[in-house]
Protein backbone atom coordinates (compact mmCIF):
# COMPACT_ATOMS: atom_id res chain seq x y z
CA UNK A 1 0.00 0.00 0.00
CA UNK A 2 2.81 2.40 0.92
CA UNK A 3 4.59 1.59 -2.37
CA UNK A 4 1.38 2.22 -4.28
CA UNK A 5 0.94 5.63 -2.63
CA UNK A 6 4.54 6.61 -3.43
CA UNK A 7 4.10 5.72 -7.06
CA UNK A 8 0.91 7.75 -7.16
CA UNK A 9 2.64 10.73 -5.57
CA UNK A 10 5.51 10.65 -8.07
CA UNK A 11 3.13 10.39 -11.03
CA UNK A 12 0.92 13.15 -9.59
CA UNK A 13 3.85 15.57 -9.28
CA UNK A 14 4.96 14.76 -12.86
CA UNK A 15 1.48 15.31 -14.29
CA UNK A 16 1.04 18.63 -12.48
CA UNK A 17 4.43 19.85 -13.69
CA UNK A 18 3.72 18.72 -17.24
CA UNK A 19 0.34 20.42 -17.31
CA UNK A 20 1.87 23.62 -16.03
CA UNK A 21 4.75 23.81 -18.48
CA UNK A 22 4.06 21.70 -21.59
CA UNK A 23 1.23 23.98 -22.64
CA UNK A 24 3.93 26.60 -23.22
CA UNK A 25 4.99 25.02 -26.53
CA UNK A 26 4.83 27.87 -29.00
CA UNK A 27 2.11 27.64 -31.63
CA UNK A 28 3.39 27.77 -35.19
CA UNK A 29 2.64 30.80 -37.33
CA UNK A 30 3.34 31.06 -41.05
CA UNK A 31 6.24 33.43 -41.84
CA UNK A 32 4.97 36.73 -43.16
CA UNK A 33 5.50 37.23 -46.88
CA UNK A 34 4.41 40.37 -48.69
CA UNK A 35 2.42 39.19 -51.70
CA UNK A 36 1.66 41.40 -54.73
CA UNK A 37 -1.97 42.18 -55.44
CA UNK A 38 -1.77 40.88 -59.02
CA UNK A 39 0.63 38.89 -61.17
CA UNK A 40 2.84 40.72 -63.65
CA UNK A 41 0.56 40.57 -66.66
CA UNK A 42 -1.95 42.94 -68.18
CA UNK A 43 -4.04 40.36 -69.98
CA UNK A 44 -5.98 37.08 -69.89
CA UNK A 45 -6.76 37.21 -66.16
CA UNK A 46 -10.55 37.47 -65.85
CA UNK A 47 -11.64 38.32 -62.33
CA UNK A 48 -15.12 36.78 -62.46
CA UNK A 49 -13.80 33.35 -63.35
CA UNK A 50 -12.75 30.73 -60.85
CA UNK A 51 -9.04 30.20 -60.29
CA UNK A 52 -8.03 27.33 -62.57
CA UNK A 53 -6.11 25.75 -59.66
CA UNK A 54 -9.49 24.72 -58.23
CA UNK A 55 -10.46 22.84 -61.40
CA UNK A 56 -9.75 19.13 -61.73
CA UNK A 57 -7.69 18.10 -64.74
CA UNK A 58 -10.68 16.01 -65.86
CA UNK A 59 -12.64 19.23 -66.35
CA UNK A 60 -9.81 21.51 -67.40
CA UNK A 61 -8.60 19.44 -70.36
CA UNK A 62 -11.25 18.55 -72.94
CA UNK A 63 -9.58 15.78 -74.95
CA UNK A 64 -10.86 12.40 -73.65
CA UNK A 65 -7.75 10.61 -74.94
CA UNK A 66 -5.54 13.01 -73.00
CA UNK A 67 -7.62 12.67 -69.83
CA UNK A 68 -7.37 8.89 -70.19
CA UNK A 69 -3.58 9.10 -70.38
CA UNK A 70 -3.49 11.24 -67.23
CA UNK A 71 -5.82 8.81 -65.43
CA UNK A 72 -3.52 5.95 -66.34
CA UNK A 73 -0.46 7.88 -65.15
CA UNK A 74 -2.17 8.64 -61.82
CA UNK A 75 -2.55 4.91 -61.21
CA UNK A 76 0.64 3.46 -62.71
CA UNK A 77 3.36 6.13 -62.74
CA UNK A 78 6.26 4.79 -60.70
CA UNK A 79 7.47 8.16 -59.40
CA UNK A 80 4.01 8.83 -58.01
CA UNK A 81 3.81 5.34 -56.51
CA UNK A 82 7.12 5.98 -54.72
CA UNK A 83 5.75 9.27 -53.35
CA UNK A 84 2.62 7.51 -52.09
CA UNK A 85 4.77 4.88 -50.40
CA UNK A 86 6.67 7.69 -48.71
CA UNK A 87 3.36 8.95 -47.30
CA UNK A 88 2.69 5.47 -45.95
CA UNK A 89 6.16 5.37 -44.39
CA UNK A 90 5.76 8.79 -42.74
CA UNK A 91 2.27 7.87 -41.54
CA UNK A 92 3.68 4.91 -39.63
CA UNK A 93 6.32 7.14 -38.05
CA UNK A 94 3.68 9.71 -37.06
CA UNK A 95 1.42 7.07 -35.54
CA UNK A 96 4.37 5.76 -33.59
CA UNK A 97 5.13 9.26 -32.27
CA UNK A 98 1.70 9.31 -30.59
CA UNK A 99 3.02 6.65 -28.19
CA UNK A 100 5.89 8.79 -26.91
CA UNK A 101 3.83 9.82 -23.84
CA UNK A 102 2.90 6.22 -23.02
CA UNK A 103 5.09 4.37 -20.50
CA UNK A 104 7.18 1.52 -21.84
CA UNK A 105 6.34 -1.80 -20.24
CA UNK A 106 8.33 -5.01 -20.50
CA UNK A 107 8.21 -8.43 -18.88
CA UNK A 108 11.18 -10.58 -17.94
CA UNK A 109 11.81 -13.96 -16.34
CA UNK A 110 15.26 -14.81 -15.01
CA UNK A 111 16.78 -17.92 -13.44
CA UNK A 112 20.28 -17.63 -11.95
CA UNK A 113 22.34 -20.46 -10.48
CA UNK A 114 25.64 -19.43 -8.90
CA UNK A 115 28.29 -21.87 -7.60
CA UNK A 116 30.68 -19.73 -5.49
CA UNK A 117 34.08 -20.81 -4.23
CA UNK A 118 34.02 -22.88 -1.03
CA UNK A 119 36.55 -20.48 0.47
CA UNK A 120 34.51 -17.38 -0.40
CA UNK A 121 32.11 -15.66 1.94
CA UNK A 122 29.16 -16.48 -0.32
CA UNK A 123 30.22 -20.13 -0.56
CA UNK A 124 30.58 -20.52 3.20
CA UNK A 125 27.23 -18.80 3.84
CA UNK A 126 25.49 -20.91 1.21
CA UNK A 127 26.77 -24.10 2.77
CA UNK A 128 25.94 -22.93 6.29
CA UNK A 129 22.47 -21.53 5.83
CA UNK A 130 21.17 -23.37 2.79
CA UNK A 131 23.02 -26.65 2.97
CA UNK A 132 24.05 -26.30 -0.68
CA UNK A 133 27.23 -25.46 -2.54
CA UNK A 134 25.33 -23.27 -4.97
CA UNK A 135 22.77 -20.46 -4.82
CA UNK A 136 19.58 -20.14 -6.84
CA UNK A 137 17.53 -17.06 -7.69
CA UNK A 138 14.30 -17.02 -9.72
CA UNK A 139 12.58 -13.80 -10.76
CA UNK A 140 9.57 -12.95 -12.92
CA UNK A 141 8.88 -9.21 -13.21
CA UNK A 142 7.05 -6.48 -15.07
CA UNK A 143 9.13 -3.33 -15.66
CA UNK A 144 7.72 0.14 -16.33
CA UNK A 145 9.56 3.26 -17.46
CA UNK A 146 8.07 6.68 -18.20
CA UNK A 147 9.50 10.10 -18.98
CA UNK A 148 7.25 12.90 -17.83
CA UNK A 149 6.83 15.52 -20.55
CA UNK A 150 7.43 18.42 -18.18
CA UNK A 151 8.77 20.89 -20.75
CA UNK A 152 6.82 19.73 -23.81
CA UNK A 153 9.85 18.02 -25.38
CA UNK A 154 7.84 14.97 -26.37
CA UNK A 155 5.08 17.18 -27.69
CA UNK A 156 7.69 18.91 -29.85
CA UNK A 157 8.81 15.58 -31.26
CA UNK A 158 5.22 14.74 -32.12
CA UNK A 159 4.96 18.09 -33.92
CA UNK A 160 8.08 17.23 -35.93
CA UNK A 161 6.66 13.85 -36.91
CA UNK A 162 3.36 15.44 -37.93
CA UNK A 163 5.09 18.05 -40.07
CA UNK A 164 7.17 15.35 -41.78
CA UNK A 165 4.02 13.33 -42.48
CA UNK A 166 2.21 16.34 -43.95
CA UNK A 167 5.29 17.14 -46.06
CA UNK A 168 5.07 13.75 -47.73
CA UNK A 169 1.44 14.43 -48.60
CA UNK A 170 2.35 17.75 -50.21
CA UNK A 171 5.27 16.09 -52.00
CA UNK A 172 2.85 13.60 -53.54
CA UNK A 173 0.63 16.48 -54.67
CA UNK A 174 3.66 18.16 -56.24
CA UNK A 175 4.46 14.95 -58.12
CA UNK A 176 0.85 14.85 -59.36
CA UNK A 177 0.89 18.45 -60.62
CA UNK A 178 4.18 17.88 -62.41
CA UNK A 179 2.98 14.55 -63.78
CA UNK A 180 -0.19 16.08 -65.20
CA UNK A 181 1.80 18.88 -66.85
CA UNK A 182 4.39 16.50 -68.28
CA UNK A 183 1.78 14.15 -69.75
CA UNK A 184 -0.21 17.03 -71.25
CA UNK A 185 2.83 18.73 -72.74
CA UNK A 186 4.08 15.43 -74.13
CA UNK A 187 0.67 14.79 -75.71
CA UNK A 188 0.55 18.26 -77.28
CA UNK A 189 4.10 17.82 -78.59
CA UNK A 190 2.98 14.54 -80.13
CA UNK A 191 0.07 16.28 -81.89
CA UNK A 192 2.49 18.98 -83.08
CA UNK A 193 4.82 16.35 -84.55
CA UNK A 194 1.86 14.68 -86.26
CA UNK A 195 0.92 18.01 -87.81
CA UNK A 196 4.49 18.78 -88.86
CA UNK A 197 4.81 15.32 -90.41
CA UNK A 198 1.59 15.84 -92.32
CA UNK A 199 2.72 19.28 -93.49
CA UNK A 200 6.11 17.96 -94.56
CA UNK A 201 4.61 15.07 -96.54
CA UNK A 202 2.16 17.46 -98.21
CA UNK A 203 5.00 19.79 -99.22
CA UNK A 204 7.02 16.79 -100.42
CA UNK A 205 4.18 15.83 -102.71
CA UNK A 206 3.98 19.40 -103.98
CA UNK A 207 7.77 19.55 -104.52
CA UNK A 208 7.60 16.28 -106.45
CA UNK A 209 4.85 17.65 -108.69
CA UNK A 210 6.92 20.78 -109.35
CA UNK A 211 9.98 18.65 -110.13
CA UNK A 212 8.04 16.64 -112.70
CA UNK A 213 6.80 19.86 -114.30
CA UNK A 214 10.36 21.28 -114.51
CA UNK A 215 11.67 18.01 -115.93
CA UNK A 216 9.03 18.16 -118.66
CA UNK A 217 9.95 21.75 -119.42
CA UNK A 218 13.62 20.77 -119.64
CA UNK A 219 12.73 18.08 -122.16
CA UNK A 220 10.92 20.73 -124.22
CA UNK A 221 13.87 23.10 -123.91
CA UNK A 222 11.90 25.64 -121.90
CA UNK A 223 14.14 25.54 -118.79
CA UNK A 224 17.63 24.52 -117.84
CA UNK A 225 19.07 21.47 -116.10
CA UNK A 226 20.07 23.77 -113.21
CA UNK A 227 16.42 24.49 -112.44
CA UNK A 228 15.67 20.76 -112.31
CA UNK A 229 18.69 20.12 -110.11
CA UNK A 230 17.73 22.90 -107.67
CA UNK A 231 14.23 21.46 -107.37
CA UNK A 232 15.68 18.01 -106.71
CA UNK A 233 17.71 19.49 -103.86
CA UNK A 234 14.59 21.10 -102.40
CA UNK A 235 12.72 17.80 -102.63
CA UNK A 236 15.58 15.86 -101.00
CA UNK A 237 15.82 18.37 -98.13
CA UNK A 238 12.15 17.93 -97.41
CA UNK A 239 12.48 14.16 -97.73
CA UNK A 240 15.41 14.17 -95.29
CA UNK A 241 13.35 15.87 -92.55
CA UNK A 242 10.64 13.17 -92.58
CA UNK A 243 12.70 10.43 -90.81
CA UNK A 244 13.76 12.96 -88.18
CA UNK A 245 10.14 13.87 -87.43
CA UNK A 246 9.10 10.20 -87.44
CA UNK A 247 11.89 9.46 -84.98
CA UNK A 248 10.69 12.27 -82.69
CA UNK A 249 7.14 10.87 -82.86
CA UNK A 250 8.29 7.43 -81.73
CA UNK A 251 10.48 8.86 -78.96
CA UNK A 252 7.61 11.02 -77.68
CA UNK A 253 5.27 8.02 -77.73
CA UNK A 254 7.82 6.03 -75.74
CA UNK A 255 8.14 8.85 -73.18
CA UNK A 256 4.37 9.06 -72.73
CA UNK A 257 4.13 5.29 -72.35
CA UNK A 258 6.74 5.32 -69.59
CA UNK A 259 4.95 8.20 -67.83
CA UNK A 260 1.81 6.07 -67.74
CA UNK A 261 3.73 3.12 -66.29
CA UNK A 262 3.59 1.08 -69.51
CA UNK A 263 6.23 -0.37 -71.79
CA UNK A 264 7.14 1.83 -74.79
CA UNK A 265 4.45 1.57 -77.43
CA UNK A 266 2.09 3.43 -79.70
CA UNK A 267 -0.13 6.15 -78.27
CA UNK A 268 -3.57 6.09 -79.84
CA UNK A 269 -4.95 9.54 -80.57
CA UNK A 270 -7.94 10.87 -82.47
CA UNK A 271 -7.52 14.64 -82.21
CA UNK A 272 -5.17 16.86 -84.18
CA UNK A 273 -3.35 20.03 -83.20
CA UNK A 274 -5.88 22.10 -85.14
CA UNK A 275 -8.88 20.54 -83.38
CA UNK A 276 -7.61 20.66 -79.79
CA UNK A 277 -10.12 22.50 -77.64
CA UNK A 278 -8.54 25.05 -75.33
CA UNK A 279 -9.85 25.52 -71.78
CA UNK A 280 -12.99 27.64 -71.50
CA UNK A 281 -11.23 30.32 -69.47
CA UNK A 282 -7.79 31.03 -68.07
CA UNK A 283 -7.76 32.74 -64.68
CA UNK A 284 -4.71 32.61 -62.44
CA UNK A 285 -6.52 34.15 -59.49
CA UNK A 286 -4.57 36.33 -57.06
CA UNK A 287 -1.01 35.67 -55.84
CA UNK A 288 -2.02 35.02 -52.22
CA UNK A 289 -3.93 31.91 -53.36
CA UNK A 290 -0.62 30.27 -54.21
CA UNK A 291 -0.02 29.80 -50.48
CA UNK A 292 -2.98 27.42 -50.42
CA UNK A 293 -2.68 25.65 -53.77
CA UNK A 294 1.05 25.26 -54.49
CA UNK A 295 2.26 21.99 -52.92
CA UNK A 296 5.90 23.09 -52.95
CA UNK A 297 5.06 26.26 -50.98
CA UNK A 298 3.09 24.24 -48.45
CA UNK A 299 6.00 21.80 -48.19
CA UNK A 300 8.38 24.68 -47.50
CA UNK A 301 5.97 26.05 -44.89
CA UNK A 302 5.83 22.65 -43.19
CA UNK A 303 9.62 22.58 -43.11
CA UNK A 304 9.51 25.88 -41.20
CA UNK A 305 6.96 24.35 -38.84
CA UNK A 306 9.14 21.29 -38.32
CA UNK A 307 12.23 23.42 -37.66
CA UNK A 308 10.33 25.48 -35.08
CA UNK A 309 9.46 22.28 -33.23
CA UNK A 310 13.10 21.18 -33.50
CA UNK A 311 14.21 24.42 -31.80
CA UNK A 312 11.83 23.70 -28.91
CA UNK A 313 13.06 20.11 -28.56
CA UNK A 314 16.70 21.21 -28.63
CA UNK A 315 16.08 23.90 -26.03
CA UNK A 316 14.13 21.63 -23.71
CA UNK A 317 16.88 19.00 -23.92
CA UNK A 318 18.99 21.35 -21.80
CA UNK A 319 16.35 21.32 -19.03
CA UNK A 320 15.96 18.66 -16.30
CA UNK A 321 14.14 15.47 -17.22
CA UNK A 322 12.00 13.41 -14.87
CA UNK A 323 12.00 9.65 -15.34
CA UNK A 324 9.82 7.29 -13.34
CA UNK A 325 10.57 3.59 -13.17
CA UNK A 326 8.73 0.78 -11.44
CA UNK A 327 9.18 -2.95 -11.15
CA UNK A 328 7.08 -5.68 -9.60
CA UNK A 329 6.79 -9.45 -9.69
CA UNK A 330 7.81 -12.59 -7.86
CA UNK A 331 11.23 -13.61 -6.59
CA UNK A 332 12.43 -16.72 -4.73
CA UNK A 333 15.68 -18.56 -4.00
CA UNK A 334 13.96 -21.89 -4.61
CA UNK A 335 11.96 -22.67 -7.71
CA UNK A 336 9.33 -24.46 -5.64
CA UNK A 337 8.59 -21.19 -3.83
CA UNK A 338 8.67 -18.99 -6.97
CA UNK A 339 4.91 -18.52 -7.15
CA UNK A 340 4.22 -18.78 -3.46
CA UNK A 341 1.92 -15.78 -3.09
CA UNK A 342 2.15 -13.35 -1.33
CA UNK A 343 5.49 -14.34 0.14
CA UNK A 344 7.37 -14.16 -3.16
CA UNK A 345 5.91 -10.79 -4.27
CA UNK A 346 8.23 -7.80 -4.54
CA UNK A 347 7.96 -4.27 -5.94
CA UNK A 348 9.89 -1.03 -6.28
CA UNK A 349 9.37 2.45 -7.71
CA UNK A 350 11.81 5.27 -8.34
CA UNK A 351 11.77 8.77 -9.69
CA UNK A 352 14.91 10.40 -11.04
CA UNK A 353 15.56 13.96 -12.16
CA UNK A 354 18.53 14.38 -14.49
CA UNK A 355 20.04 17.76 -15.36
CA UNK A 356 22.80 18.03 -17.98
CA UNK A 357 25.72 19.97 -16.50
CA UNK A 358 28.83 19.40 -18.59
CA UNK A 359 28.52 17.62 -21.93
CA UNK A 360 31.08 19.31 -24.09
CA UNK A 361 28.58 22.04 -25.05
CA UNK A 362 26.81 19.54 -27.32
CA UNK A 363 23.25 20.46 -26.30
CA UNK A 364 23.94 24.19 -26.62
CA UNK A 365 25.49 23.64 -30.06
CA UNK A 366 22.50 21.56 -31.16
CA UNK A 367 20.18 24.33 -30.01
CA UNK A 368 22.11 26.99 -31.94
CA UNK A 369 22.24 24.74 -35.01
CA UNK A 370 18.48 24.20 -34.85
CA UNK A 371 17.98 27.98 -34.97
CA UNK A 372 20.23 28.23 -38.03
CA UNK A 373 18.26 25.46 -39.76
CA UNK A 374 15.04 27.28 -38.89
CA UNK A 375 16.37 30.46 -40.52
CA UNK A 376 17.29 28.44 -43.60
CA UNK A 377 13.80 26.92 -43.72
CA UNK A 378 12.19 30.35 -43.54
CA UNK A 379 14.42 31.65 -46.34
CA UNK A 380 13.54 28.57 -48.38
CA UNK A 381 9.84 29.23 -47.82
CA UNK A 382 10.14 32.83 -48.99
CA UNK A 383 12.16 31.73 -52.01
CA UNK A 384 9.50 29.15 -52.95
CA UNK A 385 6.89 31.92 -52.87
CA UNK A 386 9.02 34.15 -55.10
CA UNK A 387 9.60 31.27 -57.50
CA UNK A 388 5.88 30.47 -57.66
CA UNK A 389 4.85 34.08 -58.37
CA UNK A 390 7.57 34.26 -61.02
CA UNK A 391 6.43 31.03 -62.71
CA UNK A 392 2.82 32.21 -62.89
CA UNK A 393 3.88 35.61 -64.23
CA UNK A 394 6.12 33.95 -66.83
CA UNK A 395 3.33 31.65 -67.97
CA UNK A 396 0.88 34.53 -68.31
CA UNK A 397 3.34 36.52 -70.41
CA UNK A 398 4.12 33.49 -72.57
CA UNK A 399 0.45 32.85 -73.26
CA UNK A 400 -0.11 36.47 -74.20
CA UNK A 401 2.90 36.75 -76.50
CA UNK A 402 2.39 33.34 -78.09
CA UNK A 403 -1.18 34.32 -78.96
CA UNK A 404 0.19 37.40 -80.70
CA UNK A 405 2.81 35.35 -82.54
CA UNK A 406 0.23 32.73 -83.53
CA UNK A 407 -2.02 35.35 -85.12
CA UNK A 408 0.90 36.67 -87.14
CA UNK A 409 2.00 33.14 -88.07
CA UNK A 410 -1.52 32.26 -89.25
CA UNK A 411 -1.50 35.25 -91.58
CA UNK A 412 2.00 34.37 -92.72
CA UNK A 413 0.97 30.79 -93.53
CA UNK A 414 -1.96 32.05 -95.61
CA UNK A 415 0.20 34.56 -97.48
CA UNK A 416 2.95 32.00 -98.14
CA UNK A 417 0.37 29.57 -99.54
CA UNK A 418 -0.97 32.26 -101.86
CA UNK A 419 2.59 33.17 -102.88
CA UNK A 420 3.28 29.59 -103.95
CA UNK A 421 0.17 29.54 -106.13
CA UNK A 422 1.12 32.86 -107.75
CA UNK A 423 4.72 31.75 -108.30
CA UNK A 424 3.52 28.57 -110.03
CA UNK A 425 1.14 30.46 -112.22
CA UNK A 426 3.70 33.11 -113.19
CA UNK A 427 6.36 30.45 -113.82
CA UNK A 428 4.06 28.64 -116.26
CA UNK A 429 3.75 31.87 -118.23
CA UNK A 430 7.49 32.66 -117.99
CA UNK A 431 6.84 35.64 -115.71
CA UNK A 432 8.72 34.18 -112.71
CA UNK A 433 11.98 32.29 -112.37
CA UNK A 434 12.37 28.80 -110.87
CA UNK A 435 14.31 30.44 -108.02
CA UNK A 436 11.22 32.40 -107.05
CA UNK A 437 9.17 29.18 -107.12
CA UNK A 438 11.68 27.42 -104.84
CA UNK A 439 11.79 30.35 -102.41
CA UNK A 440 7.98 30.44 -102.26
CA UNK A 441 7.85 26.69 -101.56
CA UNK A 442 10.51 26.93 -98.84
CA UNK A 443 8.76 29.87 -97.17
CA UNK A 444 5.42 28.03 -97.22
CA UNK A 445 6.89 24.94 -95.57
CA UNK A 446 8.67 26.95 -92.88
CA UNK A 447 5.59 29.11 -92.17
CA UNK A 448 3.36 26.08 -91.71
CA UNK A 449 5.89 24.31 -89.49
CA UNK A 450 6.35 27.44 -87.36
CA UNK A 451 2.58 27.82 -86.98
CA UNK A 452 2.26 24.24 -85.74
CA UNK A 453 5.08 24.85 -83.28
CA UNK A 454 3.50 28.06 -81.96
CA UNK A 455 0.14 26.35 -81.46
CA UNK A 456 1.81 23.65 -79.39
CA UNK A 457 3.84 26.20 -77.44
CA UNK A 458 0.70 28.13 -76.55
CA UNK A 459 -1.08 24.99 -75.35
CA UNK A 460 2.00 24.06 -73.34
CA UNK A 461 2.12 27.55 -71.82
CA UNK A 462 -1.50 27.14 -70.68
CA UNK A 463 -0.51 23.81 -69.14
CA UNK A 464 2.47 25.45 -67.44
CA UNK A 465 0.13 28.08 -65.99
CA UNK A 466 -2.20 25.36 -64.70
CA UNK A 467 0.73 23.67 -62.97
CA UNK A 468 2.29 26.87 -61.64
CA UNK A 469 -0.91 27.98 -59.89
CA UNK A 470 -1.08 24.58 -58.21
CA UNK A 471 -3.68 22.79 -60.32
CA UNK A 472 -3.74 19.12 -61.21
CA UNK A 473 -3.56 17.31 -57.87
CA UNK A 474 -7.25 17.56 -56.93
Image (cartoon, rainbow, N blue to C red):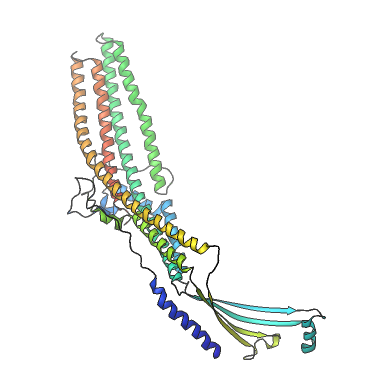
- Residue 248 sits above or below residue 93 on the image: above
The answer to whether 319 appears left or right of 468 in the picture is: right
The residue sitting at the top extreme is 221
Q: In this orientation, which residue lies closer to the viewer: 400 or 82?
A: 400
Q: Quadrant of residue 256?
A: top left
Residue pictured at 43% horizontal, 81% vertical: 16
Counting every numbered tag in the picture gives 0
Q: In this orientation, which residue lies closer to the viewer: 346 or 342?
A: 346
The answer to whether 329 appears left or right of 389 in the picture is: right
From the image, which quarter does the N terminus lie in?
A: bottom right
Q: In this orientation, which residue lies closer to the viewer: 93 or 15?
A: 15
Q: Is residue 235 visible?
A: yes
Q: Position of residue 304 (x, y in %)?
A: 38, 59
Q: Is residue 55 visible?
A: no
Q: Quadrant of residue 454?
A: top left
- Residue 428 sits above or below residue 165 on the image: above
- Residue 445 sits above or below residue 287 on the image: above
Q: Quadrant of residue 48?
A: bottom left
Q: Position of residue 109 (x, y in %)?
A: 64, 78
Residue pictured at 30% horizontal, 18% vertical: 231
From the image, which quarter does the C terminus lie in?
A: bottom left
Q: Position of residue 270 (x, y in %)?
A: 29, 43
The residue sitting at the right extreme is 119
Q: Position of residue 329 (x, y in %)?
A: 60, 84
Q: In this orientation, which residue lies closer to the viewer: 88 or 46?
A: 46
Amino acid sequence: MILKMKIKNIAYIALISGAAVSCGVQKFERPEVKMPEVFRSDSIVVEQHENIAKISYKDFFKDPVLVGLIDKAMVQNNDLLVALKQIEFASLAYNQSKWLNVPTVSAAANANINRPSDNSMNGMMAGQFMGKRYMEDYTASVNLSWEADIWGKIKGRKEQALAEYLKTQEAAKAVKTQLVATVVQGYYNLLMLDTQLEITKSNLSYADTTLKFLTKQQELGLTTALAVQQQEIVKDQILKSIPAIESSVLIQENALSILTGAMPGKIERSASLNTVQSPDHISAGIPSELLSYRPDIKTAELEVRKSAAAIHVAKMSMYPSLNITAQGGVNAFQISKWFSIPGSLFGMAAGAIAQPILNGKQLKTQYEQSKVLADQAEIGFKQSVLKAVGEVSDALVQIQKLEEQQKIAEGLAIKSGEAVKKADLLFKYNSATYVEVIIAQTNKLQAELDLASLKAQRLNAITALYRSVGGGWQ
